Image (cartoon, grey):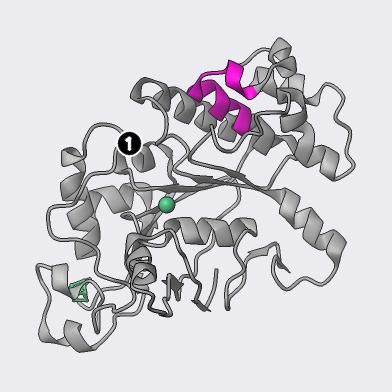
Amino acid sequence: VKDLIRIFDVSKPWLNRLIERREKAMLTAVADVSFEIEEKTVYALVGESGSGKSTIGKIIVGLLPPSSGSVEIEGVDLYREQDAKAVDHIRSDIQMIFQDPYASLNPRWRVRDIIAEPVAAQGGKVDGLAEKLLEQVGLSATDAGKFPHEFSGGQRQRICIARALASEPRLIVCDEPTSALDVSVQAQVLNLMSDLKDEFGLTFLFISHDLTVVRHMADVVGVLYLGGLVEEAARDELFDDPKHPYTRMLLAAAPKLDGFGREADLPEGEIPDPINPPSGCVFHPRCPIAIDRCKSERPALRPVGKARVACHLAE
Ligand code: SF4
Ligand code: MG
């Protein structure tokens, strides 16, 4: 995702307030966010609700065309490529696993057809495919003839993972893949994803608000605040030596999170209204070390040590 991206997003509470008041507004959900995901690694995007992480996920899988910017896999641009065959090809190279396994499986389809669908749509061979994938995700080949309602939440997320694997994708985007699951099931599904990653050399974009999960899964972490990247670093570097005040605030609040995988309010105030973002550094109203310059000058994301940080005082 490069350059400037402007989109409408009607899922956010402050936009609903505007709609109630029958006002119109332009909102920049994500801007100037640019990052690379290296093959066979897990890149985690972490941030509070409303930070833009799901928007980026939707853009990357092709569900939400950005107003500008690009999504490239090995030089092929998902939104600008003219050759329909090449576009189909990269679309099948990018699969998504959603937060809610209940909503993302067609209740009238048998599991066999759900899993094979991405391959069937490409005209590929589907004989025995679902059965093989079901076993790889810890279910049974005989489950292929059943319907989604016959499975628990954790089992349904395993079916979603099997479907995502079916087209042998290059990149799997997971948006809060375990936060709708019972606490006891979350770790099992995360461990399965880790194992599959190692076994098949998968590449993940892992979207989460949950630092416990991110620490468990990520190789590289990007921290989002109000639609912009404020810090990006290798996992251990980020957790051991966070350089942005917001990252430090997130890490300090992490033990206070309400259990494993539940979203909890951070202590130091809420994310401001993105329609009227603060001037300068958008984090300055919450920043404990802000200086005058922060109110007028927006910090660019720049290299600091091995990390990239958007803060005037990162050193
Ligand atoms: Fe805080 Fe200023 Fe750094 Fe923004 S630029 S995070 S306000 S110190
Ligand atoms: Mg989200």
Q: Residue at x 29, y 32 (%)?
A: 260
- Closer-to-camera residue (42/154): 154
Residue 198: x and y, percent? 57, 33
**Which residues are the magenta region?**
148-161
Where is mark 1, residue-wise? 261
Q: Quadrant of residue 13?
A: bottom left
Name the residue nearer the viewer: 176 or 11: 11
Residue at 45% across, 63% down: 10
Image quarter of residue 262? top left
Horizontal side of residue 284 vs 195, given as left or right: left
What residue appears at the point 50 percent right and 65 percent down from the top-left corner? 35
Q: Is residue 4 above or below residue 112?
A: below
> Is residue 152 shown in magenta?
yes
Compared to 49, does 184 lie above or below?
Answer: above
* Rendered-image quadrant of the C terminus: bottom left
Q: Is residue 180 left or right of residue 277?
A: right
Question: Is residue 14 in the magenta section?
Answer: no
Number of numbered markers: 1
Residue 17 drawn at (x, y percent) = 32, 66
Whether residue 108 is visible here, answered yes or no, is yes
User: The N terminus lies in which quarter of the figure?
Assistant: bottom right
